[in-house]
Each structure stands twice: as C-alpha cells, then as structure tokens.
Amino acid sequence: MAFQNAEGKPVLLRMVAAIQENKAHLSEIDGLIGDGDHGMNMNKGFTVFGERVREKEVSFTGGLSQLGMLLLGEIGGSMGPIYGAVFTGMAEAGEGLEELGTAEMAAMLEAGLNGLYDLVDARVGDKTLVDTLSPARDALRKAASDGLDFASALRQMKEAADAGCQSTKGLTAKYGRSSRLGERSRGVLDAGAASCAILLNAMADAILELGV
C-alpha cells in the first residue's frame, strides 16, 4: 500500500499542528542545556508555512520543498538551516512520484539525512536530531527489504524514532551551545532529536489515517 503524493496536505498540516502543540515543551527541553528558543523558532516557521498552504492545493513533496525553503531562508537559529536541509532533501527524492510507500519514504529520509550530513558533522551518538532521523531511516529501509506493508513500516519507524530520541538523554552533547556543558549535558533529551521525533510521529500518524 501507499498514499497519493497529491493528497499529502493533511500530513503537512498535522506536522504543523504537532509543532504548535509542543512548542512550550520543546523550548523547556532546550532551556535545560541550550538557549531555550527551539520551540519558539520551530513554531514560527511551521506556523508561517501552515498559513501559506492552508488554502492552497499542495502535494506532500511540494509542501516539504516549500517548508524547507522557508526554514532555510526566513527562520533564525541553527534549526532553520538544519531542518531546511532535511526537508528539501526529502522533497527532491520524492519529486515527481505519484505514490509514496515504504521504499519511497525510506529513500526520502535517506536523502534528508544526506542533506543534513552535507551541512553538519554530527553523526549518531553526538546528541542531535541525527540520533532520531538515522534510526528512523534504518527502520524504513529494513522494512522495505523485509517486504513489510507500509502501515507496519510506519509503525516501526515511529518506534525507532522514539527510541533514538530517548537515547539522547544518556549522551554527551558534541555540537551546539549544549556542547559547552560537557558531561553536564547528560540526563536531558536533545531538543532537535525531540522535535524530529514529534514530526516523524505526526507524519506517520497522518499517513496511517489516510488508510494505507
């Protein structure tokens, strides 16, 4: 099973709503070891995006491209360029596809991760959103190779994303403002990993509601 790329607007709006609903939570997490503005900046970008596409026809990949460009060009902080690279990479990988299933979504997450790797040196274990995005990509790739149906693949992706996010609590930050704390950064989730898990869960839940 797959979902129609052209019918992806509800998925995009679910991602917007998820960030809006969690903006205070994300800023609270960020405030423990960072500068506390992650939720505010993410909410700003996603809210603007939601307002721009709410009354328009937009495909899933077309919307991701618009979101990525907006975050790259209009949102401050480190997360604008980072998420901009992820979403534009995902959009490019899925551009022109009518249907998106397990293999296609795995390729899109792969491209998003590679887009991020072009921008940052962080890898798994460095207490960043890579710790969420990489295992989510791995889960989809494995599901594709195992021949799982799309719904099961999305559920496995959610589990992998959540586990990856939770793993950052035990890690020492290597990048960003929190890296200055060294060992004192342990015991707290990474805000980027948390927002990435929220977005991937929202994306998967909305696709599942489309009946894949």
Image (cartoon, grey):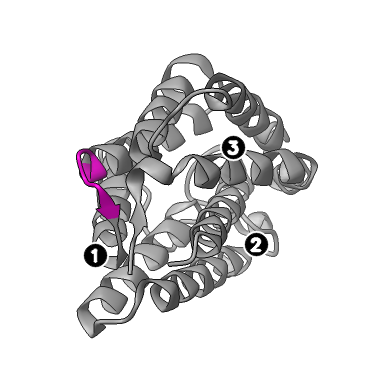
- Identify which residue is drawn at 48% across, 60% down: 132
Residue type at mark 3 is Arg
Q: Are marks 1 and 3 in contact (CB under 8 Å)?
A: no
Q: Position of residue 95 (x, y in %)?
A: 23, 39
Residue under pointer 1: 103
Which of the numbered marks, if any, corresponds to residue 177?
3
Q: CA distance from mark 3 to mark 2?
A: 14 Å
- For the residue pair 67 and 171, the one nearer the viewer reads as 67
**Under tag 1, what secondary structure?**
helix
Q: Which amino acid is tagged 2?
A: Arg
Q: Residue at x 50, y 59 (%)?
A: 210
Q: In this orientation, does residue 106 appear?
A: yes
Classify the position of the C terminus by image quarter. Answer: bottom left
Most distant residue in the top direction: 74
Q: Which mark is residue 119?
A: none
Task: Classify mark 2: residues with Cα within 10 Å, few (<14), some (14-19) or many (20+).
Answer: some
Work out whether 180 lies above or below 84: below
- Residue 186, disc: 2
64 versus 132 height, above or below: above
Q: Specify start and end residues of the magenta stretch as a single range.
A: 93-99
* Residue 80 horizontal/vertical position (percent): 49, 28
Q: Residue at x 33, y 69 (%)?
A: 1
**Which quadrant would residue 69 be assigned to in this image?**
top left
Between disc 1 and disc 2, the foreground one is 1
